[in-house]
Image (cartoon, grey):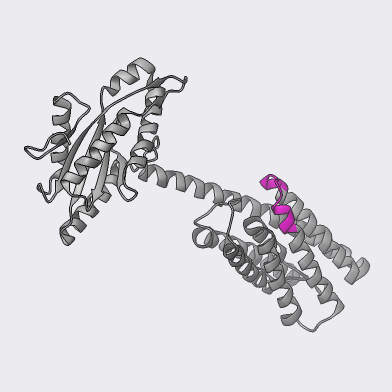
Amino acid sequence: MNDVSFETLEALIANFSIVTAYLFLASQVIYKDWNLGTPTTLYTKIHIGVLTGVLGIVLMEFTVKLNGTILDFRHLAITIAALFGGVYSAVITGIIMSLMRLLAFGTLSPATMFAASNTLIISILLGWICTRNLSYWKKWTYSLLVNNLFTIIIFHINLGTKGTIPSLIYLIMMTLGGIFTAYLIQFLIKAKTHFQMIEKAATFDFLTELNNHRTFDEAFNSLLLEAKDKNEALTLMIIDIDHFKKVNDTYGHPNGDTVLKQLGKLLKDVSRSFDIVSRIGGEEFAILLYDCPHKHALIIGERIRMAVKNNDFLLNEGKIIQITVSVGVATYPDTNDNIKEEADKALYKAKSCGRNLVCSNLVGLNEA
């Protein structure tokens, strides 16, 4: 009796460990690029179905044997497939597990046929439940109810009154396993979401969602090396809002933030699709223009200046204001490697000459 209890406990621990290992691996490799509840392609659904089908097969290998009855966590694999991939994934998982049950686990019998059919029915129902507009925990609750109800019915069909004890043990097993898996998935989703937020904060400006200063520096260094290797032009354009302090003082910082957001979007829209637009300071922006000669960059800078000047910036209260920008432009190899400082000098020239100007760092080339 003690040996049976030990083997049962050992099998349960093995099932928990397999589910845990799969979910941690899946969150880092299989599901790393998308979140629970987001639309998935047919290929992704098939991918999920096959992989969770393999999980189900592994769980079927580590069964809890009780009075000739096989108990395991295979139906948790179906629930996971349904949550992440919907009906298609759940049914694919169910088919894989049913075929394995029929072909690899002993001879065919009415009991195995009932078990395989039960798995397919549960797959369809769980897939349907997990595609409904329900909360995460309601999906888990209904899925566990369906799992337990249908499996207990199969126990009583196959075993009669002898199925009572296995049914109770299965009910406890699946409920604990389901709660554990649900909490683990929720934990992994939250951890992933926090990681993505931190990763985004380290890469993008939180307000405008443009590249931040760190990302700008990385892109600048990379493009400058590439420009040197390929003997191409690299232009840096620094853009600063004129009298932005007055906007903040007059309309308040929340409205100032609104102006910055709208300007960031405008700069993206007016720039070339492959130009790199960044926010590098409070009201200071930068654009990297690869393979863009200096004179052409001045034309683009003038286009940006006019677009900003003619744009209506809508404040939070509905008021419309206009702003202007000063633009400094420097280009490698027309100037030395130190084009950041040269672009800053050009910006200072634009500010000193009255603002609302595009200025070059080169002598004799001022406003476009």
Answer above or below: position of 80 versus 202. below
Q: Report the front residue among 363 and 188.
A: 363
Answer above or below: position of 133 versus 111. above
Magenta-highlighted residues: 126-138
Q: Is residue 326 left or right of residue 42?
A: left
Residue found at the very far bottom of the displayed protein:
107
Residue 277 spot, x, y in % from top left: 31, 43
Q: Is residue 330 left or right of residue 68?
A: left
Residue found at the very far left of the displayed protein:
363
Majority secondary structure of magenta residues: helix
Residue 310 spot, x, y in % from top left: 33, 28
Answer above or below: position of 113 versus 282. below
Q: Is residue 29 left or right of residue 178?
A: left
Residue 73 spot, x, y in % from top left: 70, 64
In the picture, which quadrant includes the N terminus?
Answer: bottom right
Is residue 281 visible in the rendered structure shown here?
A: no
Q: Quadrant of residue 166?
A: bottom right
Q: Residue at x 50, y 57 (%)?
A: 32
Residue 361 spot, x, y in % from top left: 12, 38
Q: Report the front residue among 368 and 356.
A: 368
Q: Residue at x 17, y 27 (%)?
A: 351
Residue 296 part of the magenta segment: no
In the picture, which quadrant includes the C terminus?
Answer: top left
Q: Residue at x 77, y 62 (%)?
A: 122
Q: Report the front residue among 351 and 3.
A: 351
Numbered marks: total: 0
Q: Quadrant of residue 51?
A: bottom right
Is residue 12 visible in the rendered structure shown here?
A: yes
